Image (spheres, rainbow, N blue to C red):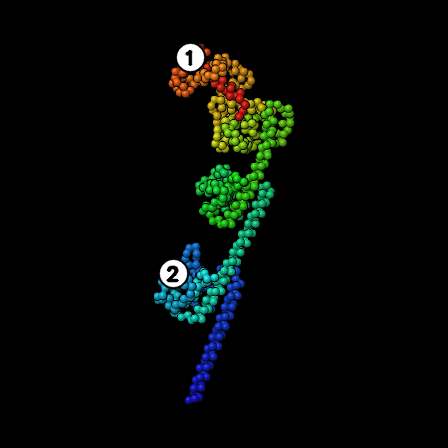
Amino acid sequence: MAGDARVRESVELALTVSERLAERDRRERELTALYETAGDLSSLRDVEEVLQAIVARARGLLGTEAAYLMLIDEQRGDTYVRVTDGIHTEAFKTARLAMGAGLGGLVAQTRQPYATPDYPHDKRFVHTVDEVVGGEGLIAVLGVPLLLREKVIGVLFAANRRERPFADAEVALLISLATHAAIAIETASLFADVRAHSDLMERAANVHERLTTVAAQGGQLPEVAAVVAEVLGAGVFVADPGLRVLASAGPVGSAAGEPVTGDVAKTCRSAIATRATAATPEGCAAPVVAGSQVLAVLVACRGDLGVADQRTVERAALVAAILLLTERQLAEAEHRVRGDLLTELLADAQPDPDGLRRRARLLGWDLDRPHVVVVAYPERAEDRRVLASALGSWAAQCGGLCGEHGRDVVVLLPGTDPASAAPAAVDRLRRAVAAPVTVGAAGLGEGPAGLRDAHRDARHCVDVLCALGKAGTAASPPDLGAFGLLFGPAGRERVAAFVQRTLGAVVDYDTQRGSELLRTVEAYFDADGSHVRAAAALFIHVNTLYQRIERISALLGEGWRTGENALQIQLAVKLHRIVNFTDQPPG
């Protein structure tokens, strides 16, 4: 009996040793597998490869039929299946769960592993995706949290399609794998961020180099737009502050010269008003700013532009500002040269006509070609520079010359009809400034002397329009009718004599006594002889008006209000006003 007991004891001891050896071998295999897994995961740099390797290792180490990984979507506030291994149904692969729902939600909330040998009948958690899990046929499920510095970033699962309990060693093994996996995910994400940042830096450097080359080689706005359109794969345009397209590239809705409309126009106005980049679902607009002035706005028409793409648009806007400033400086320099030439050409004394012709040829302008002279007189002096810019581009297109002369802007247009040139100038100026601009046009004039005479006639047109209360309109000499008699020194002398002969007594009376008889004559005829309306226009009592009319009749004779005498008096009043207005220096 004693021998049997020793045999049983030896057998039990042998079995214990065998189990411990088997446990040690299993543990060594698990540790070796974990070590290899850690090495594999640490060598991966692509996030997708890391995630796929995690679930494959989990399935292999635990010997389960399936494994999958769910991650937390912080932006949407839920969880979703990210990668799977051994999963067959599409509904499972694309499943999303509310935060805290199901077995995964329980693991994420408690930060503790959870194992169930019979998922469908486990009452310890709320069942929310039984249809999806049942469709895949999963029965036994083990889930462990992916912890990254105490933060749960997801849940790692191993599962079988039959009932199976999970041993503590298996739970510990999956926890160890999840720990390595969380670190590997973070590492791969950091590498992805570094790669993305490196790619962005490289692209930014490439864009900067290309845009700098455009600026250094004296490029134009269309080239800037073309570079940005190619880099971003978007339609790009540059528009002036009035939202007219200056240049474009790629698929955009408006061509050069056309207005920007719709939601894109709202985005442009926002960028101009705030002097900051404005991004909307339709695209991104960056103001082209120089100092305190917005020169234009650059727009990329693509709805999914990221922060780096917006920086590209802003960088292009800076280059556009440099090009526009350079273009403006060159235009101002040329404007000064042309303005100097125009000033000398229109001067009363011209000591060197041949010298003027040579300087004109250097500017590509033929002085002896027939020209119409247009004079634009702005109501506000501060509008003169804007007018010069607006008319300067018109003159350049026509092969003419434009410059400032006193308070005026003068344009010389080759081979143009004065009658059409004046309205055309007004149309352009109305788009440039809001205040009234009076325009006169005359010609055709040839050579220095002829152009000077045409300028004098055009300037007289402006004077007459202003004297007649028609500021803000346009005219050429034929448009003035009888008032065209004013042109030419001889005509002015005859008009002055006519006015003196017809109205001299009244004018002298007003001059000597400071009265307003001449103004009363004008108001009387403007009111068509109505005493009441004339008195109201003069802000005097009707009796006062009668007294003034008696004094005028004493000076001019009783018949001054009727027949031919009335016509002569009215004409003399208008001519007196014009003569006195045009005798004043311009401005």
Give the camera-side residue of 572 and 516: 516
Q: Amino acid at mark 2?
A: Ala
> Which residue position holds label 1?
550
Give the camera-side residue of 265 and 381: 381
Establish if 543 lies above or below 307.
above
Q: Amino acid at mark 1?
A: Glu
How many C-alpha atoms fall within 10 Å of the one at disc 1: few (<14), some, or many (≥20)?
Answer: few
Residue 168 coordinates in the image, percent (x, y) = 43, 71
Residue 497 disc label: none
Residue 437 coordinates in the image, percent (x, y) = 50, 28
Find the distance from the CA under tag 1 to the CA under tag 2: 106 Å
Q: Secondary structure at mark 1?
A: helix
Give the residue displayed 41% in from the left and 63% down from the top.
110
Give the residue displayed 63% in from the left and 25% down from the top.
353
Give the camera-side residue of 149 and 394: 149
Decide if residue 200 is in sight here: yes
Establish if 320 lies above or below 102.
above
> Which residue position holds label 2?
101
Decide if residue 268 is in sight here: no
Give the residue displayed 52% in from the left and 54% down from the top.
196
Precedes in sequence: disc 1 or disc 2: 2
Give the residue displayed 41% in from the left and 14% down from the top.
547
Q: Quadrant of residue 145?
A: bottom left
Q: Are marks 1 and 2 in contact (CB under 8 Å)?
A: no
Q: Quadrant of residue 167?
A: bottom left
Between circles 1 and 2, the one closer to the viewer is 1
How many C-alpha atoms fall within 10 Å of the one at disc 2: few (<14), some, or many (≥20)?
Answer: many
Residue 482 coordinates in the image, percent (x, y) = 49, 18
Residue 302 coordinates in the image, percent (x, y) = 48, 47
Q: Secondary structure at mark 2?
A: loop
Say which quadrant the N terminus sits in. bottom left
Establish if 36 lies above or below 517.
below
